[in-house]
Image (cartoon, rainbow, N blue to C red):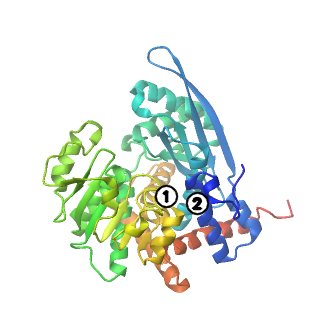
Amino acid sequence: MATPTKETSLETTNSMLATTLALFDSTFERLQLDEGIASIMRQTEVEMTVTIPIIADDGRILTFKGYRVQHSSARGPSKGGIRYHPDVDIDEVRALAMLMTLKCAAVNIPFGGAKGGICVNPAELSMHELERLTRRFAKMIAPILGGKRDIPAPDMNTNEQTMAWFMDEISSIQGYYSPEITTGKPVILGGSEGRTEATGRGVAIATVELLRKLGREPQGARVAVQGYGNVGYYAANILADEYGCKVIAVSDVSDALYNPKGLDLAAINQHVAHSPGRLLKGFTGNAEHITNAELLTLDTDVLIPAAIENQITGKNAGQIRAQIIVEGANGPTTYEADLILRDRGIHVVPDILANAGGVIVSYFEWVQDLQFYFWDIDEVRRQLYKKMSRSFEEAWAMAQERKVDLRSAVYMLAVQRVADAIQKRGYVSSGR
């Protein structure tokens, strides 16, 4: 793989990959990391690109491009989601795999990072076609998967049904039931209680932890959430119901709703539950209809970008009025925007910590599958809170000790843990 180095212009490559590598490089410099170790971490370990043929319902043969990238196995099996989206490409998957390595290290769970995806618009396929696509993809990348090698999970436009098909296909190849091969499965097939809400709950925990560090309780704090999919939905509702926050804005691809006095989330949830595609479009309750761009610059205490990458950029970072940003999405803030936010004194909980609740409960699911012993929802939530709050505390302590922002602190913790694992394992030992 031709990986950009520190001298590579951010404009010459995929923006998400460029942002990720820029963050890696700035962290390497802060830590004064050995250049050889840094070189290992800039590269991916394994990449697989496949062309996936399936027979459509009408008999046509359709082909799709699929990817699986393993960035690092230094700290344990590779772990990462599989997304279905028409814009998926190899650079995006590389970047997300790198971020997964750091995410797992940031919350100190024994996984490395991986990511996968298929360049497809799943809305254009029937359920039977999606099953054929998933099973064929699973079969094609099976040689690099395994419960102790690489463990997929749901991501954008994939879900527990996708993971059930995936697990069943790999199990049929192996000849025995292997629930640990994926996470995010239905509970009846070895999935964990609390997995669906986990990422959003982690975002909520990170939000509350930062509010308290800044000297205020969450009760009454104004929150705007961009993206009312799985992550944004649970983050908003948990913050409102369990912590007393006032959610003043939510959005999705179809609409954005705003009420400075607080939205009626119960009414919105009722609408979404019966809306085609579970969208906000058509909501007629007490809310002003604004744009996604306007939501990002609202006067609010907390902004949670939980939609897609590159939403806060150099063009709008100077207009952000929230004092706290908690990144529910992967890569919602560009490198240029992050520098602007840092200069303005806006506190940012980075994605690799803020949205790590999903991979933490995926880890819990994997542990339960290996033991064939399953926890109840209260135990999952208790362990998630313990892991998220401890990880936040470690990041906050690093930020205070090194006098850096939270993103820099989290990256320093994560990169150092991966680097230490590489050194201790002796990847470059002359004795081999």
Q: Residues within 10 Å of mark 2 (few under 14, many from 20)?
A: some
**Most distant residue in the front direction:** 315
Residue 350 % position (x, y): 47, 66
Quarter of the image with the C terminus is bottom right
- Asked whether residue 262 is in view, the answer is yes
Residue 412 % position (x, y): 58, 73
- Seen in the image, is 145 located left or right of residue 212? right
Q: Is residue 143 above or below residue 369?
A: above
- Seen in the image, is 259 located left or right of residue 200? left
Residue under the point 58% across and 33% down: 65
Residue 104 % position (x, y): 54, 61
| Alpha carbon separation for disc pair 2 and 1 | 8 Å
Residue under the point 49% across and 51% down: 366
Give the residue at mark 2.
Answer: 20
> Which quadrant of the figure has residue 154?
top left
Mark carried by residue 221: none
Residue under the point 35% across and 67% down: 205
- Seen in the image, is 203 located left or right of residue 402? left
Number of residue marks:
2
Camera-side residue of 128 and 96 = 96
Q: Name the amino acid type tagged 1.
A: Gly
Q: Name the amino acid type tagged 2.
A: Thr
Camera-side residue of 183 and 216 = 216
Q: Is residue 102 above or below residue 291?
A: below
- Asked whether residue 376 is in view, the answer is no
Q: Secondary structure at mark 2?
A: helix
Camera-side residue of 199 and 165 = 199
Give the residue at mark 1.
Answer: 331
Contact (Cβ within 8 Å) of mark 2 with mark 1: yes
